[in-house]
Amino acid sequence: MFVRIVVLTARLGWMRRSLTIAGLLLGQAWGAASPFATWAREMEEAGVPEVAAHVAKAPLLARVWFHGHLADLAKGDERARAVGAALADDQAVTVLAGLDATSLQRVRSRVLAAVAAMAGGATPDQALGRVRSVAEAHGVCYGLLFDAHLKRARLAGWGDTSARLAAARRLAALLSVVGDDLTPWRTMAAWVGQPVVPDGTLTSVARMETRGMNAMLTGQPLRARRHLRAAWYAGSRDPLAPVWLLGAAAADDVVGREDAANEARSNVIGAIRAGPAWLQAALRVRVLAASIAAGDVETAHEAIETLAGGTWRRDPMSLAVYDVAAASPLLHGGGVAEKRAPK
């Protein structure tokens, strides 16, 4: 009798845990706990005149909605255009909203191809070869989150959702470092409804990356530096490893470790070996801008020398940063010849 009671108790415990897990998965699949699902439903119920006020309530989630509705934007949809106008402070949104319908459809095709590739397991450096600029890469990141929202609404879509969230997490970190702007990472956290991006089920290297970015988000530069340098060392063969070293350099700047930051940025230049040309250029442009800000003319010179030529100059976001940095009096006062990119 005692044995039967123990076995029955164990079975009931297992069933209770199974039902709890199933309940969580079903809740996630139906979008019950999704801040984005709730916000998007309210957005679609609101009138077009109310869009700006609704965007102001959750501008991070509005970015996901905007990039998920590029097809509507290309068709001239009033709601999509109103969201774009309300997000005028976001350069990636402004770039895409300013395209004509034909160009926007081409961008959307490239973005969707990259979203599908990343959701299918392609690494970011492979998938991002399908797009041509930083603005389009933002479209991929937020497009993955929007696609995850759609998959989440399906009972059998949890595995698809997880794959898209994993891909979006890495891309959000990359874009936050390359753009020197944590908005993509904040958006990732807002989508999952947490103050930071959860790291509990990640691999060791991904956990280092995530903890480093979360530390940047919460104003802990020393912690960020430690985790991002660990990610750099652990994934040194990863084409994206220079991104984490560049993030660590930014943390060094915050805590006043100028020599360490300058050395790290110089090492980033030497470590960029793979990935699409526009992404390699975006990293070098960020090194250039950060080096100018830090007064490190030598590393700035290295960055400019490696940026000669290339189709990256069609990328409006990188080009804008390059133009400002390359025109710096500090750079020219250091004896570096001006090499402004053509308009």
Image (cartoon, rainbow, N blue to C red):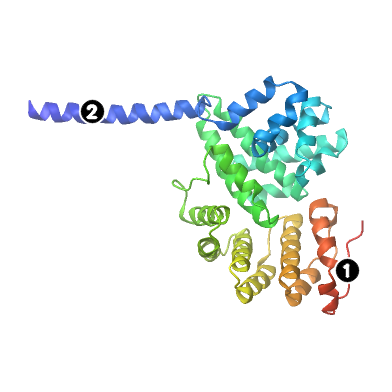
Instruction: Name the amino acid, label 2.
Output: Arg
Q: Which residue is mark 2?
A: 11
Q: Which residue is mark 1?
A: 339
Q: Residue furthest left?
A: 1
Quadrant hosting residue 142: top right
Instruction: Name the amino acid, label 1.
Output: Lys
Q: Position of residue 259 (x, y in %)?
A: 63, 77
Q: Position of residue 169 (x, y in %)?
A: 58, 46
Can you see residue 332? yes
- Neighbor class of circle 2 (other Cα within 10 Å; few <14, some 14-19, many 20+) is few
> What residue do we see at 60% from left, 40% from top?
119
Q: Residue furthest right?
A: 343
Q: Position of residue 265 (x, y in %)?
A: 67, 69
Quadrant hosting residue 25: top left
The relative height of residue 40 versus residue 239 in the rendered view (above or below) is above
Q: Nearer the viewer, residue 173 or 15?
A: 173
Q: CA distance from mark 2 to mark 1?
A: 72 Å
